[in-house]
């Protein structure tokens, strides 16, 4: 069900390490968005699922928790997460534990172990579509994760779609322009098409099957991510309060 790793491991770490500069505008946008979601009422324990080394995780946001448990199926992830974030978190008195496990399959058990924690799916739900060619099964597995969180505070950032772009936008961004961002579900009328046009998408784009993760009342934020110069992702982020 949730057992392959086509989106993590050494290739991901290499890509993330060498893309730090290109990804910085998306990391900044994610930081601003994350900082606006959590409140003094947000649980101080965080379960961070699909954490990898936290290549796109902002320190400032992580620092506000008392305890963080990271989860990844990649055995390198925990070491690298500690290398990147460990010292700073320790300096802020944050307890950090990194776990190598399939946290999507184990989600109900993890929620039982941590009844007071909030959960953040860190760019992992959109990767489930690579686990099977059975679209219905992928959507079912994804929705099971979401349903398990009933009554919890939780959030997710994930791929909504990804695909080729024309090089022109990347060139104009190199001159310092901000990446496109917008709010809303974008699934009505031509809104998704307008968004894709704004990031100069070239057909065909891959649907990551995450369109039903957030219910209508959840405020959704859309961000562009220049994953590779000619292959970009449309990220959707949302935060759910019980
Ligand atoms: C696109 S990467 C995102 C990495 C991370 N959020 C970051 O900022 O570096 C997706 C990550 O999800 C992990 N992953 C995939 N399936 C998983 C599962 N079932 N449980 C835990 N982690 C998983 C992969 O190993 C990979 O590290």
Image (cartoon, rainbow, N blue to C red):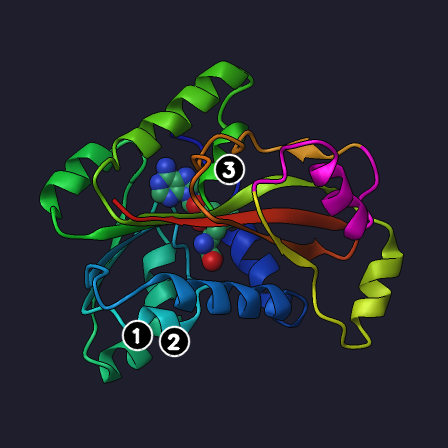
Residue in the image at 39% along x and 74% along y:
59
Does residue 63 belong to the magenta stretch? no
Residue in the image at 33% along x and 69% along y:
62
Is 57 left, or right, of 164 in this rendering?
Answer: left
Kindly identify which numbered label has been placed on residue 63. 1
- On whether ligand 1 comes within 8 Å of the CB at mark 3, the answer is yes
Relative height, residue 120 to residue 207 (above, below): below
* Residue marked by disc 2: 60
* Residue marked by disc 3: 127
Secondary structure at numbered mark 3? helix
| Spatial separation of the CA atoms under disc 3 and disc 2 | 26 Å
The part of the image, by quadrant, that contains residue 105 is: top left
Marker count (numbered): 3
Secondary structure at numbered mark 2? helix
| Spatial separation of the CA atoms under disc 3 and disc 1 | 27 Å
Q: Are marks 3 and 2 in contact (CB under 8 Å)?
A: no
Is 242 left, or right, of 211 in this rendering?
Answer: left
């Amino acid at each position: 069900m949730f057992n392959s790793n086509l989106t993590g491991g050494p290739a991901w770490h290499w890509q993330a390490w060498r893309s730090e500069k290109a990804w910085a505008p998306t990391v900044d946008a994610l930081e601003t968005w994350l900082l606006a979601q959590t409140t003094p009422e947000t649980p101080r324990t965080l379960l961070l699922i699909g954490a990898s080394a936290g290549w796109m995780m902002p320190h400032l946001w992580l620092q506000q928790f008392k305890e963080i448990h990271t989860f990844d199926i990649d055995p390198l992830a925990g070491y690298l997460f500690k290398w990147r974030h460990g010292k700073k978190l320790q300096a802020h008195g944050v307890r950090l534990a990194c776990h190598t496990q399939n946290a999507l399959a184990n989600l109900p058990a993890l929620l039982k172990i941590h009844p007071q924690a909030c959960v953040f799916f860190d760019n992992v739900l959109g990767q489930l579509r690579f686990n099977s060619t059975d679209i219905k099964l992928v959507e079912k597995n994804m929705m099971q994760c979401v349903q398990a969180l009933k009554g919890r505070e939780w959030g997710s950032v994930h791929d909504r779609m990804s695909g080729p772009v024309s090089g022109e936008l990347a060139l104009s961004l190199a001159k310092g322009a901000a990446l496109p961002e917008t709010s809303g579900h974008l699934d009505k009328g031509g809104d998704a098409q307008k968004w894709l046009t704004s990031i100069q998408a070239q057909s065909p784009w891959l649907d990551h099957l995450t369109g039903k993760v957030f219910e209508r009342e959840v405020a959704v934020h859309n961000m562009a991510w220049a994953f590779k110069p000619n292959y970009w992702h449309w990220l959707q982020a949302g935060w759910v309060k019980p």
